[in-house]
Structures are given as C-alpha cells and as structure tokens.
Amino acid sequence: MLRRIGFIGLGTVGKHMAANLTKANYELTVFDLSQSAVDDLKALGAGAATSAAEAAKGRDLVIAIVPEGSELASLVFGEHGILAGIDPGTILADMGSHALETTMKTAEEAAKKKVMYLDAPVWGNKDHAVNGLMTIIAGGDPALVGRCQEPFSYFGLNVIHVGRIGDATKMKFIVNLVQAELVQVLAEGLVFGEKMGFTADRILEVLDTRGVASPLFHQKGRSMARGDFSRSLALKYVNDQLHMVMNAARLTGLTLPAAEAASKVYEEAVGRGLGEEDFSAVIKVLRK
C-alpha cells in the first residue's frame, strides 16, 4: 500500500492534482519553488517540505511534475533535488513533459539509486486537474502502474500504459503536436471567418455540428470568442513542447511542415509577452 506520497511541482495543474490527493487518507508532503503554492496545499492538510529532497525522503511514492527547463536541473538532479533525497525502493512517477534525453537520464539516475521509475507524463489542463480528469500516459513496468492505480485515480480518469520507459514521453510528443496544431488551426479559422464578416460564435456553431467538432475546439473556441485567455495550459509550455517535438522529429529524419509553421506562431506569441497566458492566446498573433 502506498500511503506516504511526496509531490514536487505545484504549477497550473500540479497544485490541483496534489489538492485532490489531500481528499484521501495519504500522508502527503509537497514542495514547490513558489512558497504561496506550498502554503495553499498546507492549508488543505498537506505537509510542507523545505526542499525537493525533503519531500522525496521517506516516501513510498514520489510524484514529480516539473517542466523541462532551468528548474528541472535543481529540483530533480541538484544538491537538494529529488534524487538527492529519495530512498531505494521508492516509486518515482515522473509526470512532467520532457525531452526524451531528459526522461532517459532521469531513469538512469533513478536506477543507480535502486529507485523504481515510471515515465508518466500527464495530459490535461487546469479544469481536468481540478476535476480529477487527467490522463496519465505510462511507460515502464506494468506492475508499478498497477501499484499506483489508487493514488492516480484521485486526479486521473485514464491511465494508459503504452510500453517501456521512454515510450510515454514519445506518445506525449504526439499529443503535444496535435493539440498545439489544432488550436493554431482553429485560431486561423476564426480570424479568417471574422475577416469575412462572421462572428466567432456563428463560426463555432457551424464547426460544432459535424466532422471537425471536438471538445478542444468547443472549449478553446469559446474562450477565444470571449477573449478569455486565463491560463489553463500556459502558451510558453506549448511553445517549449513544440520545440521538443521538432527536435525528436529531426532525430528520426522526419520533417513536420505544419508543426514548423505552428511553432513560428507560438514563438511569436511568446516574443509578444503572451507566454503566461493560455495557449489559446495564440489567436492574438493572427489578429493583427
């Protein structure tokens, strides 16, 4: 039974995933570089650690949702990082979106410490996290996935095992690619339609009726129509994820023309200071 859980990474979705774990009878200890995020979880009954190493020490399961980038080096590999504190025999569920090289390096370092590693990136936005509807894409030992099923169920609706360590990261590349392109394409359709004299609501009414209808189109289209770009999935992270996708594609000798075109739009959006907004704010680049 996994009762003692460490949770590192209380960002847009992480803090709500951790909050859902406080509803169960777990001994939960959390850490984030944002003290206010830690304080919010402490108010819900979680224990507060002073470092990632402390949050990982003495746990049965450690969940890490740390984005690729500068924070990852210190929070995972640093002197006071997860791998410095985690004990042999602990399960480390790595739920961030990473480059394949990062996933394999973390798995290798975990193995040196006899830590049981799961490549387990999550897919979903803030609303999914709040309502316990995240999807966990899992790569690694299926028996470990089974052992984590109960705690995962408090924030995840679907747990999909896709293969070995590294395979879940690769699958998340596909998810990130399609999701980013769909929202950028939707933004183009709305801007094009508006230029031809239609309202965004009327365009979405038509799109919602047949083959291109999707929950993503419906949700993000309505947000774009209202001009509501409050952060559910940060544009800066989608931009970073597209860069990782294209790098992975280059390593396989593949060219992704649509991804390259979409990436330029997201890159421009970040350059305009839109990185902290929801990734649907990419439409602002097109509304020149």
Image (cartoon, rainbow, N blue to C red):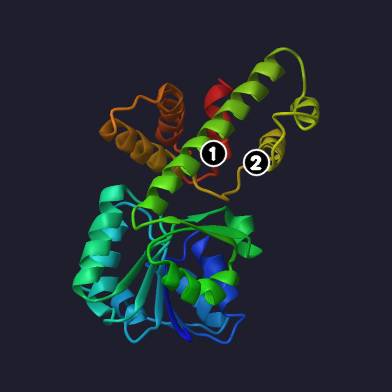
Q: Quadrant of residue 272?
A: top left
Q: Which residue occupies the foreground of this view, 159 or 95?
A: 159
Q: Quadrant of residue 25?
A: bottom right
Residue 124 x/y as whole percent: 56, 53
Labelled disc at residue 216: 2
Quick check: 72 above or below 40?
A: above
Q: Are marks 2 and 1 in contact (CB under 8 Å)?
A: yes
Residue 36 visible in the displayed image = no
Residue 8 x/y as whole percent: 40, 70
- At horizontal 59% and vertical 70% (from top left) the residue drawn is 153
Q: Amino acid at mark 1?
A: Gln
Where, quadrant-wise, is the C terminus in this rendering? top right
Quick check: 172 above or below 196?
A: below
Question: Which comes before the other along the chain, label 2 or label 1?
Answer: 1
Labelled disc at residue 179: 1
Q: Residues within 10 Å of mark 1 (few under 14, many from 20)?
A: some
Q: Which residue occupies the foreground of this view, 175 or 201?
A: 175
Left or right, 103 with reference to 1: left
Q: Secondary structure at mark 2?
A: helix
- At horizontal 23% and vertical 58% (from top left) the residue drawn is 105
Residue 273 x/y as whole percent: 44, 38
Q: Amino acid at mark 2?
A: Leu
